[in-house]
Image: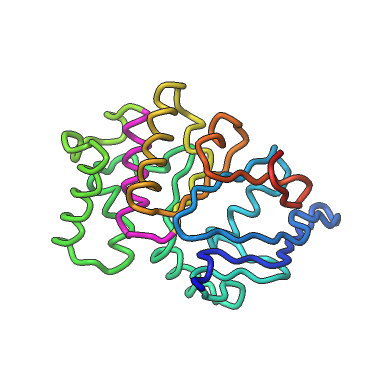
Amino acid sequence: MVAPLIEIRDLKKVYALDGIQIQALRGIDLQVEEGELLAIMGPSGSGKSTLMHILGCLDLADAGSYRLRGEDVTRMSADALARLRNREIGFVFQSFNLLPRTSAMENVETPLIYAGVGKRERRERARAALQSLGLAERLHHLPSQLSGGQQQRVAIARALVSRPALLLADEPTGNLDTTTSDEILRLLEDLNRREGLTIVLITHEPEVARHAGRTLYVRDGCLEAHP
């Protein structure tokens, strides 16, 4: 039997705020299979963002276990987590997070620089990623010269150029109009269907979650099936 891409057991996270203990996650269990398109919903303060940070190896749980491709993330050092993030996880954010004075091509190359990929291969892979997302004519444009939808496509190309196992999309359409949002969500659906890419959508919008094959809901630090 093939192991799940993500396997989480009894995950807990507590924050201290002004001397008060806040239970952000209260014993989360979660499995995500390779090739899934999963939506995780929840309002502000539900624990949704905390869960995303742990899934993305940006934070560690206080208790419980998290295995990504069979690797026990909860026991890793900060350096090992950084290597794992760069190798296995791509991120797409609501605010695009592009370097403002850097071309689309150079933005997409950035993760490959950290991975130690040579300049020629970086250029080839960045160009191919942008071309595959319909940006062949925008390789040398700055973010300020691109529309919101084009900026998000650059961000997706940057997330994909390292060939990750998992794409985490945090409110990926939050800064886009309805038509552009639909285009980006169809693009993510196509990547999931055509490439078999595992995608986790973090959202508070039912319209976004409807594009997923499965939806879960975070409520008061607990995870439940969406009704």
Spot occupied by residue 9 in the image (x, y as percentages of width and height): 69, 67
Inspect the magenta stretch and tell me whether residue 160 lies in it: yes
Q: Is residue 124 left or right of residue 174?
A: left
Magenta range is 148-165
- Of residue 122 and residue 64, the one placed in the foreground of this image is 64
The residue positioned farthest toward the right in the image shown: 20
Q: Position of residue 143 (x, y in %)?
A: 31, 35
Q: Give me the residue at 80% from left, 56% from top.
A: 23
Image position, residue 108 (x, y; %): 29, 49
Q: Is residue 141 above or below residue 56?
A: above
From this view, report whether residue 93 is shown above or below residue 55: above
Left or right: residue 63 versus residue 82 is right
Q: Is residue 91 above or below residue 65?
A: above
What residue is at 29 percent from the left and 61 percent from the top?
112
Q: Is residue 214 left or right of residue 91?
A: right
SS majority, magenta: helix
Residue 91 is inside the magenta segment: no
To which quarter of the image does residue 54 belong? bottom right
Residue 88 image position (x, y, % from top left): 42, 64
